[in-house]
Image: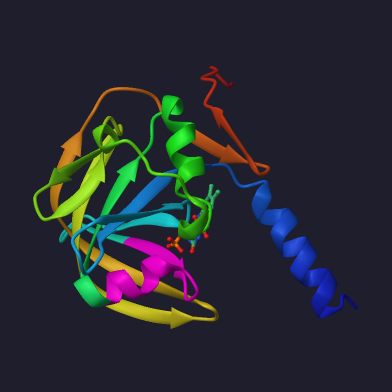
Amino acid sequence: MQTAESINQLYREAWSRFATGVTVITTFEPNRSVHGMTASSVTSVSLDPPLVLVVIGEERQSHGLIEATGRFGVSILDVGQAHIAKHFAIPPESRTSLESKHITTLSQSPVIQGAIASMDCSVIAGHKAGDHTVFIGEVEAIMIGDGVPLVWLERQFGGFLSQNLP
Ligand SMILES: Cc1cc2nc3c(=O)[nH]c(=O)nc-3n(C[C@H](O)[C@H](O)[C@H](O)COP(=O)(O)O)c2cc1C
């Protein structure tokens, strides 16, 4: 019988083996400054209407900002943007300032300049799930850029190596 403690450890280990892309979820703070957080629990949900979901820990500052503004931006990062992913993965109070050239606006949301794709989303639902909330956003604007995706696997950033598998 596995204990709750070992399940917790194995859960982390199992999911560290799941390769994902890397996004930054962006919102505005009440003073209109831009707030971001790195996120990999992001999925497309529906094509018609176009819906995405993001899973945000209740402790994250982004959680309250998304609730307050009812909007968020999603930026899918390029392999050359690991420094941006690292910047937005540490607690906001420990971050140094990020050069403004890395931020742009897509319709009503801030997004990351040079991302391989960005979306502006309006929150249509928030479902509490354990210590996280699943926010569902309707995509209202999309920007497509050039580049190749940044990948997160086994607690490391890397790139995708394309192979012709049989
Ligand atoms: C690759 C990576 C993916 C992450 N994905 C998520 C995620 O999907 N949801 C989440 O709540 N936190 C995630 N985090 C942790 C947040 O980025 C981190 O806690 C951040 O400091 C939260 O910022 P905030 O408090 O300003 O919102 C991830 C971290 C990394 C490095």
Q: Percent from the top left, x then y, of residue 11?
A: 71, 63
- Number of marks present in the image shown: 0
Above/below status of 116 relative to 31: above
Placement of the N terminus among the 4 image quadrants: bottom right
Above/below status of 17 relative to 80: below
Above/below status of 143 relative to 166: below
On screen, residue 4 versus residue 100, left or right, reads: right
Asked if residue 96 is among those painted magenta in the image, a careful observer would answer no
Among the 4 quarters of the image, the one containing residue 8: bottom right
Q: Percent from the top left, x then y, of residue 43?
A: 38, 55
Q: Percent from the top left, x then y, of residue 17?
A: 67, 46
Q: Is residue 21 visible?
A: no
Between residues 16 and 165, which one lies in front from this camera angle?
16
Q: Percent from the top left, x then y, of residue 83?
A: 48, 34
Q: Is residue 22 visible?
A: yes
Q: Residue placed at 78% from the left, 64% from the top?
A: 9
Q: Residue placed at 48% from the left, 51% from the top?
A: 40
Asked if residue 56 is among those painted magenta in the image, a careful observer would answer yes
Q: Residue placed at 26% from the left, 38% from the top?
A: 100
For the view shown, which residue lies furthest in the right direction? 1
On screen, residue 125 versus residue 133, left or right, reads: left
Between residues 165 and 42, which one lies in front from this camera angle?
42
Between residues 165 and 88, which one lies in front from this camera angle?
88
Placement of the C terminus among the 4 image quadrants: top right
Looking at the picture, the colour scheme in use is: rainbow
Q: Which residues are magenta?
A: 53-67
Q: Residue placed at 38% from the left, 62% from the top?
A: 54
